Every structure is written in structure tokens, then in C-alpha cells.
Image: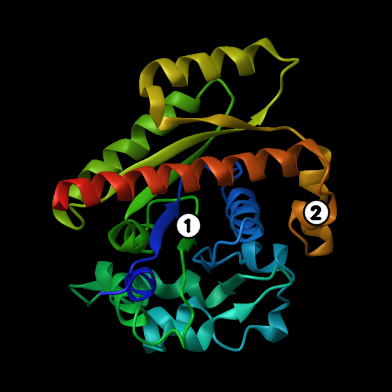
Amino acid sequence: MSDEVERRRAPRVIAIANQKGGVGKTTTAINLGTALAAIRQKVAIIDLDPQGNASTGLGVPPQDRKLTAYDVLIEGDPLSSALVKTVVPGLSIIPSDQLLSGVELELADDQRRSYRLKRAIDKSLTDLKGEALDYILIDCPPSLNVLTVNSLTAADSILVPLQCEFFALEGLSQLLRTVDRVRGHLNSRLDIQGVVLTMYDSRNNLSAEVAADVREHFGDKVYKTMIPRNVRVSEAPSVGKPVLLYDLQCSGSQAYISLAKEIVQQERKRRREEQGEIA
């Protein structure tokens, strides 16, 4: 089997999730996807949050969302039909809309409802119209519902944005219990991709204390890169652009580029280890 065929069949599927809202989850999905594309990775984002903020933040207005994640999950449309190209070369998105908020009720009688997204992604590996994806990033809603469970069931790993605040570790503990339950019942291969510290303020002692506590608990699962509080990151969604297009030189943009490089290096190391085990 050629390297190109293998690459096409196995994009890394990463769920970006945290049950706590306001931690920079969607911001991370948008800007990590952009940064990965900037270093020549082919990326698709699945916007699985009914608010559709990732879609808006990448400049996809509601009128251009002909097919959405709702159509993929409920109607069975293929991922390739719902993919929308963004202003970032190499980055596409499956947009979201408010219809996703009714998925819980619509799937109430489906005993295998947790596998809907996994089936769609598995099928997509043969119908993505020649798109050789390296990464699929799933932007999860900030709650534990059928959409989040679908994401964790479909994913190879979970990336956890963690705000540098007092209750950070408490929220993370809850999420890790959820991951354990999903791993035990729905997706045994689910791994912790890593924890990324967000909204870090170097002038604030609390940020440093939280960062130290998280690193003490989770060791090398915590990325070296920390995403700083940065007004340019906050402004970028208002113009429908990732911060890397809005202001490449700002500290937020540079942090996401650094995070993307860490993740690519991490993936290369993982693949080498897997090949070593197979050999």
C-alpha cells in the first residue's frame, strides 16, 4: 500500500472538547485548523455546535450553509457534500446551524445514535473527492450531550482547551471521567491528545499557578505552548477571519502556529512508534 493511499485513509480525528464553556474551544478549533493548514496540512473542521460559531468565525455565512452537520448526522448526506472551502487554503469546514439543537430528540429512539458521526467519517474515507486529509477537527458543544458523545465516539483523540482559572482542574476531572466512560463503552481507542492552556496572562499569578498545577497532574500531556490573552484573537471572529489572517504577527497567532507544530511533531512520533510496533 502506497504512502498516499494510507494517508488518504487515515486522517487524525481530534475532538476539541470541554464540558465547561468559555475556555477557547471554538477559537482553538478555528485557529489550530488555520495554523495546521499554514504548515501544509490538509484539514477539515466539523462544526458540531448548534451555535455555529466556528462556521461564522471562518467566514461562512448562514446563506452559504446549504448542507450542514445536521444533514450528515440525520439525513445521512456524505461529508464530501457538506464540506465548504474557507478563505484559508487547505482548510474546509462542515458548517453548523440551529437544527443541530434538536438532534437529541430526533435520535431518541436510535439505539446506535452515538455512532452516527463515526459512520459518516468512516464512509468519507472513500468519498472525499480526492481530498487527502491529514486532520479532522471536531468543534464540540460545551456540554455532554449526544453531539459530544458522537464526537468522542468518532475521534482518535481529544484535545482539551483549558482556561487558566481557579476551577480549571475541577472541570477537567469531570471531562476525563466522561472520556473514561466513552472509552469503556463506545470507543476503546480514544486517547488524550493533549491539554492546551488558554487565556494565559503572564501578569497574573493565578495563571502561573494554574499552569503549574495542570502540568503537575498531567505531565507531558500538557502542551508547552500556552495561548495568551490577546485582544486580536477576540476581535478576529467579528470580521469572519481566523486570527492568523487578521493579524499574523500578534502573540495569539504565533502561539497557534507553535501549537500546530507541536501537534504535527507529536503525530510524527506516534506514527513512528506504531510502525516500530508493527515491524
Classify mark 1: residues with Cα within 10 Å, few (<14), some (14-19) or many (20+). Answer: many
In the picture, residue 214 is in which quadrant?
top left
Q: Amino acid at mark 2?
A: Ala
What kind of element bears circle 1?
loop
Measuring from the top left, give residue 29's x and y in whole percent: 57, 54
Decide: is 15 above or below 254: below
Which residue is under mark 2? 236
Residue depicted at 64% across the width and 53% down the height:
35
Residue depicted at 38% across the width and 79% down the height:
73
In the picture, residue 47 is in which quadrant?
bottom right
Residue depicted at 28% across the width and 60% down the height:
153
Q: Amino acid at mark 1?
A: Cys
Real-space Cα distance between discs 1 and 2? 20 Å
What kind of element bears circle 2?
helix
Measuring from the top left, give residue 159's x and y in whole percent: 44, 45
Residue depicted at 22% across the width and 77% down the height:
110
| 257 displayed left or right of 146 | right
Viewer-nearest residue: 266 or 117: 266
Measuring from the top left, give residue 137's x and y in whole percent: 48, 60
